[in-house]
Image: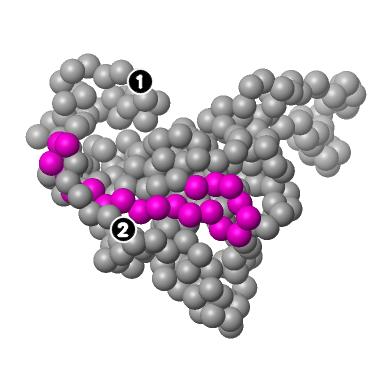
Amino acid sequence: MQHCTPETLALAALREPLPHADAAHLDGCAACRAEVASLQRGVDVLAVPQLAAPAASVPPPPRVWEAIAAATGVSATPRAEAPAVIPDVTAAPAVIPSAPVGDPAPGATVLPFRSRRRPLLLAAAAAVAGAVIGAGVVAALDRTGDDGDAVTTVALDPLAENDASGRAEVVVRDDGSRIVRVDLQAAALDDGYYELWLIDSDVEGMVPLGVVTPGTQEFELPADLDLDAFPIVDVSVEPLDGVPTHSGVSVARGQIES
């Protein structure tokens, strides 16, 4: 079987239209779809305009120029330059989400996830897990879609006093590949973004699926991912800090019943 070229996979990740033959192959090839899903994660992160904003330049320390002068024999020193003006890209209409996420929103549920510096897990994690999982556990509804695919629907309930809600559908295609289709109803965010996760029952291990925006989106699941081991569907609010781990602030959640 001739798989899609890297160029074609990149176009698919950018959600560009593909030639009919490539589109047909991608629709029937789980390996190529998994590669596209992997590439789309980076594309979706850059779709958050605040993350794509250029940062101010950092001048090199004096010792750099001293080393250059010593190696080249040049005695001149660099001319002081006026700092460049960085355009305010946040003034443009936001692609995704209006509450700041520097601190948890009023009523937000803050979960004891692993610290970003990897200290030991809190001893009370198991007890907290039992309390917070119950807020979003909803019995799943199994059905067959119009195209014959098996569909499991999970309600995403708001946590604490958050307004975010929606539903997630786990779709199993004829070829055995799976997607999670999410319909998220949530307010826009000015200083952060929503991310979709699958989390284990102990609320310790987690699998990030990608940036999710209000509306309907689909996420390809890894072929070897065991949903029985990661049954919790979680929507978090993530700050624009470049840290890939869960922020600990979840706004909506549901559980896939096995």
Residue 148 within the magenta-colored segment of the rendering: yes
Mark 2: give few (<14), some (14-19) or many (20+) Cα within 10 Å.
some
| First in residue order: circle 1 vs circle 2 | 1
Colouring chosen for the image of the structure: one colour
Q: Which tag is nearer the camera, tag 1 or tag 2?
A: 2
The residue wearing badge 1 is: 16
Which residue occupies the foreground of this view, 173 or 61?
173
Q: Is residue 197 visible?
A: no
Point out the stretch of residues depicted in magenta: 146-165
The residue wearing badge 2 is: 140
Residue positioned 45% across, 73% down in the render: 202
The number of discs equals: 2
Residue 44 within the magenta-colored segment of the rendering: no
Residue positioned 69% across, 26% down in the render: 90
SS at circle 1: loop
Please state which amino acid type lies under the numbered disc 1. Glu
